Every structure is written in structure tokens, then in C-alpha cells.
């Protein structure tokens, strides 16, 4: 598959797998890659559906089109937990709402009682509430975030007043006068 980089391509594979295909790696998420996949999927691979997508690692040129392919065929993504969680962390850093992604992942693992969904490294208390609301099995939390748990459901007037007092103390501590 071609790449818009100095390394101008990556190897990926379409493996015959019973009544369908298993794809190994997917290419970078670009219009050019989507067009190439559409050509292959409507040409040499048109006789059978894609049954699964395996991504060897989380580099964008290997996992970039995984979402597009798995949604198109309603099939599963197979990758290691570490690679998946690293991608999740990178997605969280883009400002996207994680709830739809995690809810979809929860539906994918629901038929498998031995698999639990992990919400890794929430950035704020809201993420803990969101993970709990969708029924996420495991939520990993930093110590700093755990310290903030008592502020859940706190009176907003009191919380606002305490925040103003904190800013006032910080300003005085820095030598500012109000």
C-alpha cells in the first residue's frame, strides 16, 4: 500500500480465510488509501467479505484504516491490548468524545465473557463517570485523579467559592496584589 512519506509503501496482506478474507495491516488513513482499498475490495476481493482485520502494531500506516474497514464489513479488529490502548490514548489526545468509541468497544466484547473492557488513563473525573455509566469493566485512574473523587456531586456554589479562594491564595503567594 502506498504511503505519502519518504518510506513510500508498507506491506500488508489479504489472506484467504474460509468463506472470507483476513486482512493484516491496513495502511495510513488517507483518501488515496481508501480509494486503493475500494478498488481491491470491488475487484479481486469482491467474491468474499472481510471477516477480521489484524493490526500488527499501532503505527498509523498499519492501523490507520482499521476503523474504516471494520465498520464497512462489521468485522472485528484483532490487535494486542497494549497496541489498542496506545491508540485509545492517542485518540483521547485529539479531543474526540471517547464515549461512542468505548460504548462500541463494549458491544464488541459483550459476547465474550472472558474479555473485559479497560478504560485506560482517564484525563478527568468526567471520564470516570462516563466509563461507569456505559458499564466499562475496568477503569485505570492516576493517584491525582483519585484524590479528586470526593468532589463528585459537590455543591457547585461551594466548589466555585473554594476555587476563587484558591486563585486568591495563589495570586498572593506569587506576590500579586488584588
Image (cartoon, rainbow, N blue to C red):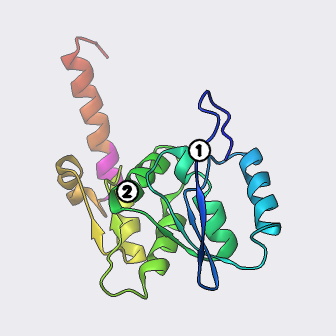
Residue at 44% in and 76% down: 106
- Secondary structure beneath disc 1? loop
Residue occupying the point 61% across, 69% down:
70
Callout 1 environment at 10 Å: few (<14), some (14 to 19), or many (20+)? some
Q: Main secondary structure of the magenta part?
A: helix
Q: Residue at x 70, y 45 (%)?
A: 30
- Return the x and y of residue 22 as percentages of the image width and height: 57, 71
The residue that disc 2 covers is 85
Displayed quadrant of residue 68: bottom right
- Relative to 90, does residue 80 appear above or below in the rendering? below
First in residue order: circle 2 vs circle 1:
1
Q: Quadrant of residue 137?
A: bottom left
**Residue 164, position as x, y percentages in the image:** 31, 35
Residue 35 as seen in the image, left or right of residue 76:
right
Q: Tell me which segment is drawn in magenta.
A: 155-160
Q: Residue 64: which disc?
A: none
Residue at 65% x, 48% y: name it. 29
Amino acid at each position: 500500500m502506498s504511503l505519502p512519506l519518504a518510506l513510500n509503501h508498507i506491506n500488508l496482506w489479504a489472506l484467504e480465510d474460509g468463506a472470507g478474507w483476513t486482512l493484516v495491516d491496513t495502511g495510513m488513513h488517507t483518501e488515496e488509501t481508501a480509494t486503493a482499498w475500494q478498488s481491491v475490495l470491488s475487484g479481486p476481493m469482491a467474491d468474499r467479505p472481510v471477516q477480521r482485520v489484524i493490526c500488527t502494531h499501532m503505527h498509523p500506516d498499519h492501523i490507520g484504516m482499521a476503523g474504516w474497514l471494520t465498520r464497512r464489513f462489521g468485522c472485528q479488529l484483532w490487535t494486542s491490548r497494549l497496541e489498542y490502548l496506545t491508540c485509545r490514548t492517542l485518540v483521547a489526545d485529539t479531543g474526540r468524545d471517547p464515549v461512542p468509541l468505548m460504548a462500541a468497544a463494549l458491544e464488541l466484547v459483550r459476547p465474550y465473557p472472558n474479555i473485559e473492557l479497560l478504560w485506560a488513563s482517564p484525563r478527568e473525573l468526567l471520564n470516570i463517570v462516563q466509563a461507569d455509566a456505559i458499564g466499562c469493566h475496568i477503569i485505570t485512574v492516576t493517584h491525582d485523579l483519585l484524590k479528586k473523587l470526593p468532589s463528585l456531586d459537590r455543591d457547585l456554589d461551594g466548589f466555585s467559592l473554594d476555587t476563587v479562594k484558591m486563585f486568591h491564595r495563589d495570586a498572593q503567594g506569587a506576590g500579586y496584589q488584588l
